[in-house]
Amino acid sequence: MSDEAPQGVRLEVRRLTKSYNGQPVLHGLDFAVERGEVFVIMGPSGSGKTVLLKHLIGLETPDEGDILIEGEPAGSPGVMERYRMAMVFQSGALLNSLNVGENVGLYLTEHRLKPPAEIARVVAEKLELLGLKGTEEKLPGELSGGMKKRVAIARALVIEPQLIFYDEPTSELDPLIAVTIGQEILRLNHRMRVTSIVVTHDRDLAFGIANRIALLHEGRILAIGTPDAVQADPNPLVQQFLKADFRFNPETSTP
Amino acid sequence: MFQNIGEIALLFGRTLKALPQTRRQFRKVLEQLFEIGNASLLMACVLSLFIGGVLALQTGPVMSERGLQSFIGQIVGLSLCRELAPVMMAVLIAGRVGSAMAAEIGSMKVYQELDALQTMNINPIHYLVLPRMLAISLGLPLLVIFAILVGWVGGALVCVFNAQIAVSFDGYMKSLGNGIDVLDVVNGLIKSFAFAVVIGTVSCHQGLATIGGPRGIGRSVTKAVVNSIVLILLLDYVLTRLLMHLDK
């Protein structure tokens, strides 16, 4: 583990298009995320957020368009090795057959980057950073949803990423833990100066942590900019998404 | 099943390409080997004891009637070495271990654990498929040797204690010794190695190809077992012909 904090990287998406079985999901998306930025991709369910994220991390191949990391196509040889990236999955995606310590240290163990004693030290350090000290021997099945998410973040941090992706980091969490996770994202961003891309439909989280927000709707970007700029966007679809609430209104409700 | 043959062959090719990684995955190979042996040894013992016994029971009285007692050991021994032990153990392992492989990898696929591995630049073929393939390719032939020995004992017990057969233990063993050659055992081991590769590749492929939720995992497990057994029986015929040709 180097003492020097990793520097974030710039990511650029150009004309990204994807269809499944002839059904377009992403329509020529164009945007850029600057180094060290917290960029939130927001949108209702089915808007293409997760598909976009899978393209950014390299789990899917676009039909058309490019994803550039520091100007280099993400799929070109050596890019994944040169720029360290990590992803925190919505479910945590911890390996259920491994305990917490083995999960967090998996990247270092499998790539043989450090001796076992050093890996154990790094794992303990990352777990402590996320308030999970002493949980190394627990199995993922013994953890709560919030703990799983934090273990997943610890596992991502071990990679010392320059670019970190979060998929719905606050889903299925109570508001207090959701706030804790949001604060963790900001703290890590501040401490390690990584570029963070967060996919969420949680408006509180998005407006609470984002430097910039992109609002996705049916595979197209409806609005992009600072939280204030997005909030002030006159597009009715943007306003509908931002202002939807639970309060019962007899005039707008259908019988 | 046949529409996936290309994908299965591709997975097998990728696993072969990953062979230089064996040393790095050695601990996982041992863990898998323990799983295979631990899960199947008792079952293999019971199965082969009774197969040997039934073989002796079916052939013994008829041969004794015709004064051919001295060939019973040879028939039981040869049948076990060349055919029954490799095929029955392969079927057992397909059901016991192949299903577990498909279920484990399938559930990892469904719950995004494979995606997580990929984002950490960990190749699922190196991490999951290679150790399982190596373990089953080593474990199944070992299990077949064990099954052959236990099956011979099963045949001997029936020959000794069945009044209609009435062949002594020494007589049975002498017949076995006269009729069995090392090449017969090697023949069975070649078959069992080929069956192990089929079970490992088909089961891992089904696991990796799993889609959907728990129902998808169930479907993958069923397909892994059924496809493995069908391929084992088809391959058994082809290998038998080939090995008979080589014996000449």
Image (tube, coloured by chain):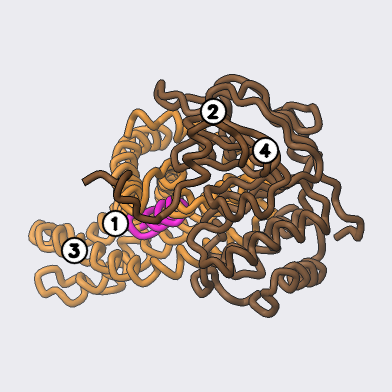
The chain letter for the residue carrying disc 2 is A
Question: What residue does disc 2 label?
Answer: A220
The magenta stretch is B93-106
Counting residues from the start of the chain, the first of labels 1 and 3 encountered is 3
Label 1 and label 2 in one chain: no
Q: Is residue A109 above or below residue A43?
A: below
Image quarter (top left, top right, bottom left or bottom right) of the N terminus of chain A? bottom right
Q: Amino acid at mark 4?
A: Ala
Q: Position of residue B13 (x, y in %)?
A: 55, 34
Q: Colour of chain B?
A: orange
Q: Quadrant of residue A225?
A: top right
Q: Amino acid at mark 1?
A: Gln
Measured in 3D between alpha carbons, the distance from the residue under mark 3 to the one under mark 2, in whole angstroms, is: 70 Å
Measured in 3D between alpha carbons, the distance from the residue under mark 1 to the one under mark 4, in whole angstroms, is: 88 Å
Question: What residue does disc 4 label?
Answer: A229
Q: Is residue B103 above or below residue A177?
A: above
Element type at marker 4? helix
Q: Position of residue B69 (x, y in %)?
A: 19, 62
Q: Position of residue B10 (x, y in %)?
A: 51, 32
Quick check: is B133 in the magenta stretch? no
Q: Is residue B190 above or below residue B73?
A: above
Instruction: Single out the mark in the foreground, 4 or 3.
Output: 4
Q: Colour of chain A?
A: brown
Residue B81 in sight here:
no
Q: Amino acid at mark 3?
A: Val
Measured in 3D between alpha carbons, the distance from the residue under mark 1 to the one under mark 3, in whole angstroms, is: 15 Å
Counting residues from the start of the chain, the first of labels 4 and 2 encountered is 2
Q: In the visual, does A55 lie left or right of B185?
A: right
Question: What residue does disc 1 label?
Answer: B74
**Extreme front residue here?**
A251
Question: What residue does disc 3 label?
Answer: B54
Q: Quadrant of residue B58?
A: bottom left
